[in-house]
Structures are given as structure tokens and as C-alpha cells.
Amino acid sequence: MPFTPQPGATDSPIRTLRKTLGITTAEYAIVLGFSSAEMSTIETGTRPLPRRVAPTLVAMGADFDELLAAQRAWILDRAVKIRASLEAELAARKQTE
């Protein structure tokens, strides 16, 4: 069954694929050729997903381009939410001054 990223998910699409496959971060890292630390930074969006892993992810049931687009959208959504949270916190602090 092919993997399709879900919009609005809490976890990144890359992490969701790993969980769907039922494997650990360490196992995912080995299969994709990363260290566990590198895999973690990819899952959290700190580091981009390199195109060289496309064939492996396709073999795991993912559409690489769709996964990459979903990951980018997830990162942007996270950034917007973090910014809104920081702006709200700053506004609240200004009101108490």
C-alpha cells in the first residue's frame, strides 16, 4: 500500500512514513545511509531530505516528490505557527509592561 502524507499532521511526513513502516529511527537511518543523528535532523526538518534517497523511499512505498513537497509544507506550517506563538508572547509581555 503506497504511503501518502497527510496535511496538518503533527509529525513530519518523513517521520510518519517511518512510523507507518514500523521501524526505529536507527533502522531508518541505516536503510537510507545516515547516522541516527542525521536522520533525526531530517525528520525534524532541520536538514533537507537529499534526492539520492529517492529510490529507497520509493521502494518503501513513498512517492518521493510528494513526500518532499509534504515535508516542505510541514516545515513552512511549523515556522508560521512558531512565529505566531512568538508574536503572541511578545504582545502579552508588552501588555504587562
Image (cartoon, rainbow, N blue to C red):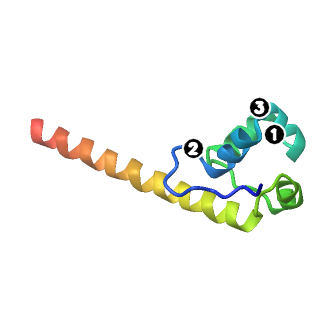
Q: Quadrant of residue 21?
A: top right
Mark 3 burial class by Cα count in 10 Å: few <14, some 14-19, many 20+: few
Task: Give x and y (percent) for residue 73.
Answer: 55, 61
Relative to 80, 57 lies left or right: right
Res. 25 in view = yes
Asked whether the beta carbons under mark 2 and mark 3 sit within 8 Å of each other, the answer is: no
Mark 2 burial class by Cα count in 10 Å: few <14, some 14-19, many 20+: some
- Sequence-wise first label, 2 or 3: 2
Cα–Cα gap, marks 1 and 2: 16 Å
| Residue that label 3 marks | 24
Label 1 secondary element: helix
Q: Quadrant of residue 40?
A: top right
Relative to 82, 30 lies left or right: right
* Number of dots carrying numbers: 3
| Residue that label 1 marks | 28
Task: Give x and y (percent) for residue 37.
Answer: 74, 34
Q: Residue at x 15, y 42 (%)?
A: 94
Cα–Cα gap, marks 3 and 1: 6 Å
| Residue that label 2 marks | 11
- The amino acid beneath tag 2 is Asp
Q: Residue at x 63, y 47 (%)?
A: 46
Label 3 secondary element: loop
Looking at this view, is 9 or 38 the one in front? Answer: 9
Asked whether the beta carbons under mark 1 and mark 2 sit within 8 Å of each other, the answer is: no
Q: Which mark is residue 69?
A: none
Mark 1 burial class by Cα count in 10 Å: few <14, some 14-19, many 20+: many
- Sequence-wise first label, 1 or 2: 2
Q: Residue at x 89, y 42 (%)?
A: 31
Looking at this view, is 78 or 6 the one in front? Answer: 6
Cα–Cα gap, marks 2 and 3: 15 Å
Task: Give x and y (percent) for residue 16.
Answer: 65, 45
